[in-house]
Amino acid sequence: MLIIDQPTVERLLPMEQCIPLMSDAFTALARGEVVLPLRPMMRLPRGLGILGMMPASVEAPRALGIKLITVFPTNHGTEFDSHQGAVLLFEPDHGALIAVLDASSITAIRTAAVSGLATQLLANAGASDLCILGSGVQARTHLAAMLLVRPIERVRIWSRSADHAHAFATAAARRHGITVDAMPTAEDAAAGADIICTVTASSEPILRGEWIARGAHVNAVGASTPHARELDTSAVRGATLFVDCRESALNEAGDFLIPKREGAISDSHIRGELGEVLLERIPGRQSPDEITLFKSLGIAVEDVVAAHHIYQRATADGAGTRVTLGGRRDAAS
Ligand code: NDP
């Protein structure tokens, strides 16, 4: 069994490889080749956070695994990531545990890669003006993903803490050699943007429909429970909505469920899943003026396909730490 740590995950899962991997994962999901139950989310005492259990089994690539992850939003600004845990990968024919991989890094990379895929599929080809709302881990990986899929020329960022926004802008400019402007309000950051990524832990809207320009594409990533949302009702109602997994969206996505509870939209507002766009079963963007919205919840097939890829590469490279566990009988005994 291999233990694969954070630096090794980051080395073996570069964003440019993760985006096509996520395309494979969503194609498999849309073909019905994935077993993907809704994830149990155990709320922890004292409201500190949640323990999420996210299993999936995939036919192609054949992989079986589960991500176990704690989400402690109050860790932001401390030495701890808000998302910590492991992806456990099993050999699908006999069920042996074959790898334990760092989940903070897999989550950071695969989530942004999925938004990269959604942007590739749905944003206007010339989209060059990027807005990021939030300045944490996902903001960092989302900037990297957006730079890969569209010819970004302008980047504006807003965060609740102006200091965090400025620190992000400075670090991002150094890392990518681009100018990133920290804006005083979310409205200033979003006005006229071609692509908007919402990557905050806010449970109340931080993006309003009236700020979104015609033709924009929005990746709504931060809220992943039925009672939390980052977008107000008009932002959702005014956009064509795509999701990672329809069943998950109908059960978990406050960005969709709150406007639905208000009577502003119905289930038919969801045009479809990313995988259905990939298979051309449903259209993507239909005009340059259409506003497209990808609601990301994050689903286990993303983690399992990413972990499978990392495991294959680690095995080939001799990376990771090998440990022997039980569960395998010696032929002589
Ligand atoms: P971080 O802890 O690194 O960053 C949190 C960000 O949220 C910071 O920018 C912080 O702003 C902002 N924030 C926190 N509370 C509020 C608030 N009340 N109003 C406005 N902004 C707020 O988290 P991550 O970057 O790892 O994750 C961001 C969000 O994305 C989380 O909600 C997380 O659960 C979600 N997520 C979704 C995934 C998916 O697949 N869809 C996967 C992984 C994460 P500031 O620093 O200025 O206070």
Image: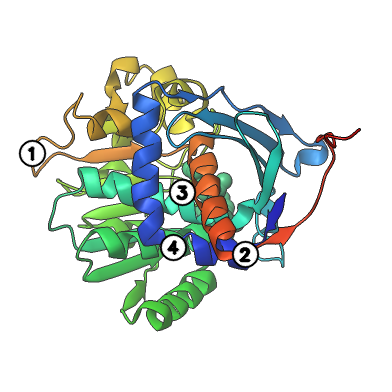
Q: Which residue reaches farthest front? A: 332
Instruction: Tell me the element at label 1.
Output: loop
- Mark seen at residue 319: 2
Question: Is residue 217 visible in this depiction of the protein?
Answer: yes
Q: Amino acid at mark 1?
A: Ser
Position of the C terminus, as image quadrant, is: top right
Judge from the rendering whether residue 20 lies leftward or rightward of residue 317; answer left or right. left
Instruction: Tell me the element at label 4.
Output: loop
Name the residue located 29 percent from the left edge and 16 percent from the top edge.
Answer: 268
Using the numbered discs, state the Cα–Cα distance from disc 2 to disc 4 in whole angstroms: 16 Å
- Mark seen at residue 111: 3
Q: Amino acid at mark 2?
A: Ala
Using the numbered discs, state the Cα–Cα distance from disc 2 to disc 1 in whole angstroms: 47 Å
Sequence order check: which comes first, mark 2 or mark 4?
4
Q: Residues within 10 Å of mark 1 (few under 14, many from 20)?
A: few
User: Residue beneath label 4, please?
Assistant: 14
